[in-house]
Image (cartoon, helix red, strand yellow):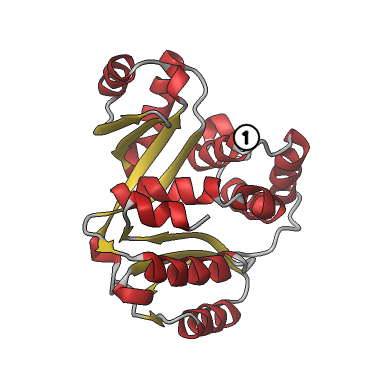
């Protein structure tokens, strides 16, 4: 769990969000298009689309981009994307889950496999590391949304499972199938969230030293650079000292 929350700090500290912003927008656009194509193009009637739009707004994606991605799905010119999950091991045996959305399964599988190999890891079979993670819904609020008790009460009322409050903000966890209902109830109580999405939460973690973390970051950076990859999750654990040296 700690590894997971620190991951957000790495993204922030390394200033990777700005570098990845245009790439991130294209990945979110793809998710919005697929969600709109699979269900209703109205976010109010399509929970998956609603969450995709919410996540896009959370990273300040322009409304025009969001509307364009929805229109692409309804216009019939959207590519047929397939959702695939890859599982493997990174440096020091860290478990890694890679979520992809692709129009060419062979190309993506080949790229993911070679990226793991080049960066000291190896791609496993589906299910090889998935048992080390739980699929959860995650809603993030800034610290100013309320004190820990206020947020805890709102989360309990909304049907959430857990709250982790710190100086950085509040991370609320719920069952994956409850995310739409829980996030709507929280919004009514606490206002707009910073982020609402489905995540993989590690149930066991692997302790990493500085060298191991540097190698892991190299692997994750390389995976995230690929347009077919939507999200990468790893079950690392690292001390604050190690994290600070990653800058």
Q: Position of residue 134 (x, y in %)?
A: 27, 53
Q: How many marks?
A: 1
Residue 221 sits above or below residue 65 on the image: below
Q: Measuring 63% from the left and 71% from the top, which residue is drawn there?
A: 103
Residue at label 1? 57
Q: Measuring 45% from the left and 72% from the top, which residue is drawn there?
A: 215
Q: Measuring 36% from the left and 28% from the top, which residue is drawn there?
A: 182
**Closer to us: 140 or 196:** 140
215 relative to 158 in the view: left or right: right
Q: Is residue 37 visible?
A: no
Q: Position of residue 94 (x, y in %)?
A: 32, 69
**Closer to us: 236 or 74:** 236
Q: Measuring 50% from the left and 42% from the top, which residue is drawn there?
A: 48
Within-10-Å neighbours for mark 1: few <14, some 14–19, many 20+: some
85 relative to 19 in the view: left or right: left
Q: Position of residue 185 (x, y in %)?
A: 39, 21
SS at badge 1 = helix
Q: Is residue 185 visible?
A: yes
60 relative to 98 in the view: left or right: right
**Closer to us: 144 or 33:** 144
Q: Quadrant of residue 88?
A: bottom left
Q: Position of residue 85 (x, y in %)?
A: 43, 67
188 relative to 103 in the view: left or right: left
């Amino acid at each position: 769990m700690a590894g997971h929350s620190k991951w957000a700090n790495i993204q922030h500290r390394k200033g990777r969000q700005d570098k990845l912003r245009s790439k991130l927008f294209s990945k979110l656009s793809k998710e919005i298009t697929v969600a709109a194509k699979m269900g209703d193009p109205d976010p109010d009637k399509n929970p998956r689309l609603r969450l995709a739009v919410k996540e896009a707004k959370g990273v300040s994606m322009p409304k025009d981009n969001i509307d364009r991605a929805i229109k692409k799905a309804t216009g019939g010119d959207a590519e047929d994307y397939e959702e695939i999950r890859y599982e493997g091991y990174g440096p020091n045996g860290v478990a890694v889950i890679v979520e992809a959305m692709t129009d060419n399964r062979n190309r993506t599988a080949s790229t993911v496999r070679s990226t793991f190999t080049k960066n000291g890891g190896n791609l496993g079979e589906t299910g090889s590391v998935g048992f080390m993670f739980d699929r959860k819904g995650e809603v993030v609020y800034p610290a100013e949304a309320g004190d820990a008790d206020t947020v805890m009460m709102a989360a309990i009322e909304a049907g959430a499972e857990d709250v982790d409050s710190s100086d950085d903000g509040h991370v609320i966890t719920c069952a994956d199938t409850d995310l739409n209902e829980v996030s709507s109830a929280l919004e009514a109580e606490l206002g707009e969230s910073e982020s609402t999405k489905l995540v993989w939460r590690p149930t066991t973690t692997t302790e990493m030293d500085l060298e191991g973390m540097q190698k892991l970051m190299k692997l994750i950076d390389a995976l995230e650079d690929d347009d077919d990859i939507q999200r990468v999750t790893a079950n690392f654990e690292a001390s604050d000292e190690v994290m600070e040296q990653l800058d």
